[in-house]
Amino acid sequence: MAAISVRLDDEALRALQQLEAAGLSRSEAIRRSIIDSAARLQRGKALADEVAALEADEADRHEMLAVAALMENLRASR
């Protein structure tokens, strides 16, 4: 394992203290936070990639517009 040093601002220090109060060691809290943050970034990137793929899919776009038009017609007929 590599040892690192960080400077925490007040907000980060309070968050760390909350994690420690929940029973995590300081090192475990920091490790988990880094891993969780990286996973969230990866999920966001994967979602953005999926949205881009759907936007590029002409058949999907036409189907989406057809469904939206159908829903609008159903709503208007009430």
Image (cartoon, helix red, strand yellow):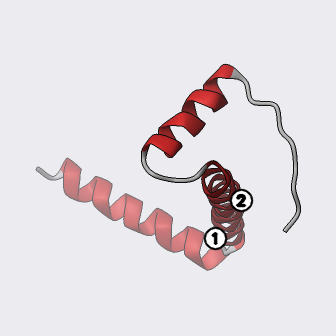
Residue type, numbered disc 2:
Ala
Location of residue 23 with respect to 39 vertically, above or below: above
Residue linked to disc 1 = 54
Q: Position of residue 4 (x, y in %)?
A: 87, 50
- Report which quarter residue 48 is drawn in: bottom right
Q: Amino acid at mark 1?
A: Leu
Quadrant of residue 41 within the rendered picture: bottom right
Could you say which disc has been placed on residue 38 in the image?
Answer: 2
Task: Please tell me which residue is depicted at 63% across the width and 52% down the height of the picture.
Answer: 33
Instruction: Report the front residue among 50 and 68.
Output: 50
Q: Residue at x 32, y 64 (%)?
A: 70
Find residue 60 and report its horizontal and vertical position in percent: 57, 75
Left or right position of 8 against 33: right
Q: Residues within 10 Å of mark 2 (few under 14, many from 20)?
A: few
Residue located at (49% from left, 73% from top): 63
- Residue most toward the bottom? 59
* Distance from the alpha carbon under mark 2 to that under mark 1: 24 Å
